Amino acid sequence: NLDTKLNLMENLQLKTSNPVQSLHSLGGVVRNVAENLGRLNQSVTLLSLLGNDMAGRQILEECQALMDVSKVQMVDGLATGSYIALLSPNGELSLGLADMNIIEKMDPDWLIAYQSTLASASLIIADNNLRKDTMEYLVDQCSILNKKLIIIGVSSPKTKRLPEKLQGTYLTLFNLDESQAYFQR
């Protein structure tokens, strides 16, 4: 994803222009983890989809020094994922907006194409932006392949994408809101 943080200079006033300070950075939960593992000299392969756009090309260019991005596909006609966070003057999240439509193309058939990559991995990390059927397939495949799977939460609304059965995952990381949303389904 391409992330944008907008820090409000004053309290939010609806239906008018608000002065902000902006910060743009590469994002995506799994991409962030992959970058940090790459900085620790770990061998990392990223599986993802990017739009064939300026943001997608920027992400590929900046990531290739830290991880193997040869399996990342560029998709015409869809935008690279983006996240915009509007932060109040005290730094609290006022509004988060996520355009993750491209991730809907990451279905089980997409993941099947990377079966050999999954089979050769020592650890698999996914976030719950993935579709529910893709998450279910991944959990099942990691169980069959005897692979450690870590699932990281991204937001409480996206917990509905998690499989009912999380047995077999090595680790799940969720904040309080995400955990409450998952268990109160």
Image (cartoon, rainbow, N blue to C red):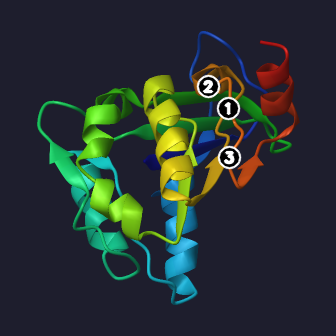
Q: Which residue is mark 2?
A: 158
Question: Which three-letter amino acid code belongs to the residue tagged 1?
Answer: Ser
Q: Give coordinates of residue 83: x percent, y percent.
A: 50, 38
Question: Which three-letter amino acid code belongs to the residue tagged 3?
Answer: Gly
| CA distance for labels 3 and 1 | 22 Å
- The residue nearer to you, when weighing 123 against 106, is 123
The answer to whether one can see residue 128 in this image is yes
Secondary structure of the residue carrying numbered label 1 = loop
In-image side of 171 versus 36 (left or right): right
Q: Say which of marks 3 and 1 sits in front.
A: 3
How busy is the neighbourhood of tag 3: few (under 14 within 10 Å), some, or many (20 plus)? Answer: some
Give the residue furthest to the left.
Answer: 76
Q: Total number of numbered labels?
A: 3
Do the CB atoms of the residues marked 1 and 2 lie less than 8 Å apart? yes
Q: Which residue is mark 3?
A: 168
Q: Using the rendered view, name the quadrant where residue 185 is placed.
A: top right
Give the residue furthest to the front.
Answer: 144
How busy is the neighbourhood of tag 2: few (under 14 within 10 Å), some, or many (20 plus)? Answer: some
Q: Give coordinates of residue 134: x percent, y percent.
A: 43, 32
Q: Which residue is mark 1?
A: 155
Question: Which three-letter amino acid code belongs to the residue tagged 2?
Answer: Lys
The answer to whether one can see residue 52 in this image is no
- The residue depicted at 33 percent of the width and 63 percent of the height is 117
Secondary structure of the residue carrying numbered label 3 = loop
- The residue nearer to you, when weighing 107 against 68, is 107
- The residue depicted at 86 percent of the width and 43 percent of the height is 90
Q: Give whichever of discs 3 and 2 has the lower sequence position.
A: 2
Q: Say which of marks 3 and 2 sits in front.
A: 3
